[in-house]
Image: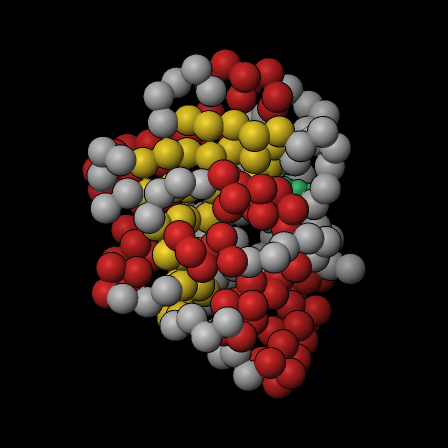
Amino acid sequence: MSLSIVLPLYNEEENILPLLNATLPVLSSLTKDFEIVFVDDGSKDKSPQILKELQKEKHIKVYTLKKNMGKATALYVGFQKATKDIIITMDSDLQDDPKEIPLLVQKIQQGYDFVNGWKKNKHLEKGDRLKRLPSLFFNNLTYVLTKVNVHDYNCPFKAYKKQVAKDLFLYGDMHRYIPVQVGNMGYTYTEVVVSNYPRKYGTTKYGSS
Ligand code: UDP
Ligand code: MG
């Protein structure tokens, strides 16, 4: 089994090293054949310098967008560059728990083409309370319109068979519709309940609007 983890990031200078420290042991416990693909979405803090040092390390690849293009474009670039058989995505702010990567990988190994995370017991921060209603509205409306049935379309924690990720066309806010694209292409999918932690460092780039 081989594994790519694709991490889009924009101004995450305080999160990069803790994220790497939490993720590396999990990946190496699963396989020797893994890569960590950082996509720097035009960060203006110290993230580019930190990543420049890190890309000297084995297993780490860094791709840099010249300007901030948004998470969907960052993911698209990461998917085009990723080379391994199974591709995992998480956010780079440690709101997801890398220890849960094996749960998603297991579902792919069972035969599903795509696994969507479900933050069932969502931790609500101050800013997040405002997102609750739009999120509920979005998830229900997306189901009604598309009939692709997952609970948490926009959950950042996802796993793909390589070809599925390569087939996605992502730009603008399209990262929110990844399960819809996957379902519409006829791929099989399932979901897994995942944890959700408060952001320790930095600020959210996506508000309730
Ligand atoms: N991100 C990105 N480009 C952007 C905005 C965000 O690559 O223009 C990354 C960000 O660094 C994080 C993920 O996308 O890894 C989700 O962003 P954020 O945590 O701000 O969103 P929230 O969790 O608050 O919805
Ligand atoms: Mg976040």
Vertically, is 204 above or below 147?
above
Seen at 56% across and 30% down, the residue is 63
Horizontally, residue 56 falls left or right of residue 134, namely: left
Horizontally, residue 3 falls left or right of residue 74, namely: left
Task: Tell me if residue 23 can be seen.
Answer: yes
Task: Identify the image quadrant of residue 4.
Answer: top left
Vertically, is 184 above or below 66?
below
Horizontally, residue 160 falls left or right of residue 208, namely: left
Count of numbered labels shown in the rendering: 0
Q: Nearer the viewer, residue 39 or 151?
A: 39
Seen at 46% across and 75% down, the residue is 186
Q: How has the structure been colored for display?
A: secondary structure
Q: Quadrant of ligand 1?
A: top right
Q: Quadrant where the C terminus lies?
A: bottom right
Task: Tell me if residue 94 can be seen.
Answer: no
Task: Identify the image quadrant of residue 64.
Answer: top right
Q: Position of residue 88 (x, y in %)?
A: 41, 49
Q: Nearer the viewer, residue 146 or 79?
A: 79
Q: Position of residue 12 (x, y in %)?
A: 60, 31
Q: Outermost residue, right direction?
A: 209
Vertically, is 159 above or below 44?
below
Seen at 51% across and 33% down, the residue is 38
Q: Position of residue 93 (x, y in %)?
A: 54, 39
Q: Nearer the viewer, residue 61 or 152?
A: 61
Seen at 61% across and 57% down, the residue is 169
Q: Position of residue 171 (x, y in %)?
A: 68, 53
